[in-house]
Amino acid sequence: MIRIIKVHNKANGRTIHERLLDEYVVLENRGYKPIKIARWKIKDAQGHEYAFPETLANGEPYEIKHGQYVFLITGPGTDRFYPGTKYHPPQYQFYWNRGWFVWNIDGDTASLYDDKGRLVQKFIVPSAKIVEPIKLP
């Protein structure tokens, strides 16, 4: 089962280009069967939409195995797979190749749809505001 586990909308960087590469959505396969996400879509509340491609940039088909991550990065780049290292798990990186931010509104909604257009999950982008707990007497 593929799930959105994070939307990183507080991008860091000195330039717009660097910040666009630091804005991303993370999906994870939490199920035990590999899942093909070609033609799946992610949409935000303002109507921005990304459709996962049939293949990676090198023409290879792909499927997300148990425990693997998918990063959808707002900025420019080449779709690829990283097999993982001692310090980083295997992950796919897909690039939206947008010139401006998508997830710049706290409370925005990231909606994930399967290849048949069925809603799989809605994820509310969390606020970065720090809220202190109320101290009771």
Image (cartoon, rainbow, N blue to C red):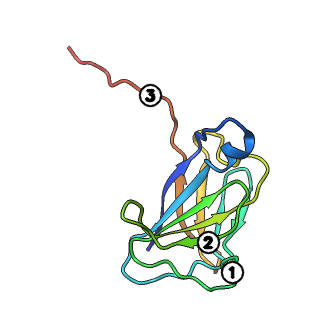
Residue 97 in picture, x, y percent from top left: 75, 59
Image-quadrant location for residue 55: bottom right
Name the residue rendered at 44%, 28% in the picture. Answer: 130
Crowd around label 2: few <14 · some 14–19 · many ≥20 (10 Å):
some
The three-letter code of the residue at mark 3 reads Ile
Is label 1 in a helix, a strand or a loop? Answer: loop
Crowding at mark 1 (Cα within 10 Å: few <14, some 14-19, many 20+): few
Whichever of callouts 1 and 2 sits on the residue coming sooner in the sequence is 1
Q: Please name the residue that numbered disc 1 is placed on.
A: 58
**Rendering quarter of residue 71:** bottom right
**Camera-nearest label, 3 or 1:** 1
Q: CA distance from mark 3 to mark 1?
A: 42 Å
Q: Residue furthest top?
A: 137
- For disc 3, the marked residue is 130
Circle 1: residue type: Asn
Residue at screen point 65% across, 51% down: 21
In-image side of 33 versus 41 (left or right) = left
Q: Amino acid at mark 2?
A: Arg
In this rendering, position of residue 131 left or right of residue 22: left
Q: Secondary structure at mark 2?
A: strand
Residue, disc 2: 80
Horizontal and vertical percent position of residue 88: 42, 61
